[in-house]
Image (tube, grey):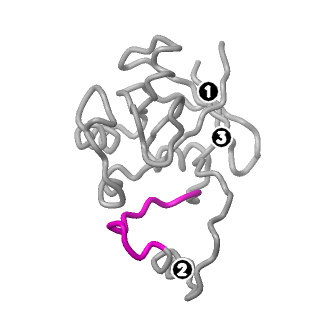
């Protein structure tokens, strides 16, 4: 078994397209809409970056065993999930290796439904004001250096 650490992005498939612009060019194995609908229908499906698919020679349907920290015990547990398509790019994701999964499946597996980062589409205007409003403040604060990781570490088998 091989272990590597990758970023895992948990999304709400029905709503992610309202929060950010998902381009069909970001994906292979279906359109953005088709793959988000698939994640909604099959919460245990996973979109995998091109590099990871190539490194592990994955084919659709393969089981990928993620090692995710359990929120209660703080120990790592193995969570089986199935490779369903390629995510060539994803908002805020690194360019090389990452996973995109259904947030509800990740929350159930970890016992933690907290959100590490939000994706918002401001239409390119008023970003500081909107961020301040969401933080409950009228004064914009500098951006936090925190990572957008949804859960870590993770590794395919």
Asked whether, in this view, residue 148 is left or right of residue 86, the answer is right
Asked whether, in this view, residue 21 is left or right of residue 105, the answer is left
Question: How far is disc 1 from disc 3 in space, using C-alphas?
Answer: 9 Å
Coordinates of residue 103 in the picture (x, y in percent): 47, 49
Image point 68% across, 44% down: which residue? 70
Near-viewer residue (136 or 157): 136
Q: Along the polypeptide, which appears first: circle 3 or circle 2?
A: 2
Image point 66% across, 12% down: which residue? 1
Residue bounds of the magenta highlight: 116-127
Residue 26 part of the magenta segment: no
Mark in the foreground, 2 or 1: 2
Coordinates of residue 107 in the picture (x, y in percent): 54, 50
Near-viewer residue (95 or 76): 95
Q: Along the polypeptide, which appears first: circle 2 or circle 1?
A: 2
Image point 56% across, 84% down: which residue? 136
Farthest-out residue, front: 125
Coordinates of residue 61 in the picture (x, y in percent): 37, 20
Q: Is residue 41 above or below residue 2?
A: below
Residue 132: mark:
2
Q: Residues within 10 Å of mark 1 (few under 14, many from 20)?
A: many
Q: Which residue is mark 3?
A: 152
Asked whether, in this view, residue 29 is left or right of residue 97, the answer is left
Farthest-out residue, bottom: 138
Question: How far is disc 3 from disc 2 in space, using C-alphas?
Answer: 28 Å
Q: Is residue 6 above or below residue 149?
A: above
Q: Secondary structure at mark 3?
A: loop
Q: Residues within 10 Å of mark 2 (few under 14, many from 20)?
A: some
Question: How far is disc 2 from disc 1 in space, using C-alphas?
Answer: 36 Å
Q: Quadrant of the C terminus?
A: top right
Q: Which residue is mark 1?
A: 155
Coordinates of residue 88 in the picture (x, y in percent): 39, 31
């Amino acid at each position: 078994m091989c272990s590597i650490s990758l970023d895992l992005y948990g999304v709400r498939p029905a709503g992610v397209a309202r929060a950010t612009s998902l381009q069909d060019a970001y994906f292979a194995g279906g359109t953005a809409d088709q793959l988000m609908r698939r994640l909604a229908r099959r919460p245990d499906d996973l979109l995998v970056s091109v590099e990871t698919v190539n490194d592990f020679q994955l084919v659709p349907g393969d089981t990928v065993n993620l090692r995710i920290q359990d929120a209660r015990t703080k120990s790592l547990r193995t969570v089986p999930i199935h490779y369903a398509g390629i995510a060539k790019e994803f908002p805020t994701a690194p360019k090389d290796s990452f996973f995109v999964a259904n947030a509800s499946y990740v929350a159930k597996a970890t016992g933690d439904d907290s959100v590490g980062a939000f994706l918002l589409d401001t239409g390119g205007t008023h970003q500081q004001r909107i961020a301040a409003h969401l933080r409950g403040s009228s004064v914009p604060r500098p951006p936090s250096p925190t990572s957008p990781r949804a859960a870590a570490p993770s590794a395919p088998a």
